[in-house]
């Protein structure tokens, strides 16, 4: 799959809202009311859609708990 690259700009309002340009929303398939995670990344922020529970169902089917590695240890 080839990734499309598009540069667009937005303006942060006095109420700290940011409008995502229509071209980006359409390309990503984002909808009004959709939730996003904002992940600090260097001097910027990564914007990631938060998946709904239904889309995650069955994702870990067959996963086993043994040999689980806890990265916080």
Image (tube, rainbow, N blue to C red):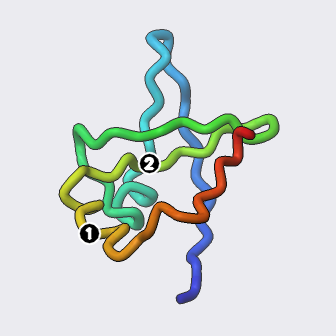
Give the percent coordinates (x, y) of residue 68. Answer: 58, 59
Which of the 4 quarters of the picture holds residue 60?
bottom left
Residue at x 35% of width, y 76% of height:
62
The local crowd at label 1, few if under 14, some if 14 to 19, many if 20 or more residues have their Cα within 10 Å, is few
Q: Residue at x 60, y 64 (%)?
A: 67
Are there few (<14), some (14-19), or many (20+) residues within 10 Å of tag 2? few
Specify the label residue 58 is tagged with.
1
Mark number for residue 19? none
Q: Secondary structure at mark 2?
A: loop
In primary-sequence order, the first of circles 2 and 1 is 2
Location of residue 3 with respect to 11 vertically, above or below: below
Using the image, determine if residue 48 lies above or below residue 13: below
Residue 52 in the image: x percent, y percent?
Answer: 25, 50
Residue in the picture at 61% in, 70% down: 5
How far across and how far down the image is residue 1, in percent? 53, 89
Quote the CA–CA distance across marks 2 and 1.
33 Å
Task: Tell which residue pokes out farthest to the bottom in this image.
Answer: 1
- How far across and how far down the image is residue 69, in percent? 65, 56
- Disc 2 marks which residue? 21
Q: Which residue in the rendered view is the most extreme toward the left?
A: 54
Query: Which image quarter: residue 3?
Result: bottom right
Q: Residue at x 29, y 60 (%)?
A: 56
Q: Secondary structure at mark 1?
A: loop
Q: Nearer the viewer, residue 3 or 54?
A: 54
């Amino acid at each position: 799959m080839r990734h499309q690259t598009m540069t667009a700009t937005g303006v942060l309002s006095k109420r700290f809202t940011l409008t995502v340009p229509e071209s980006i929303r359409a390309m990503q398939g984002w909808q009004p009311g959709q939730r996003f995670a904002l992940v600090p990344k260097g001097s910027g922020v990564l914007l990631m859609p938060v998946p709904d529970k239904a889309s995650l169902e069955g994702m870990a089917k067959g996963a086993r708990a043994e040999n689980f590695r806890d990265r916080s240890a």
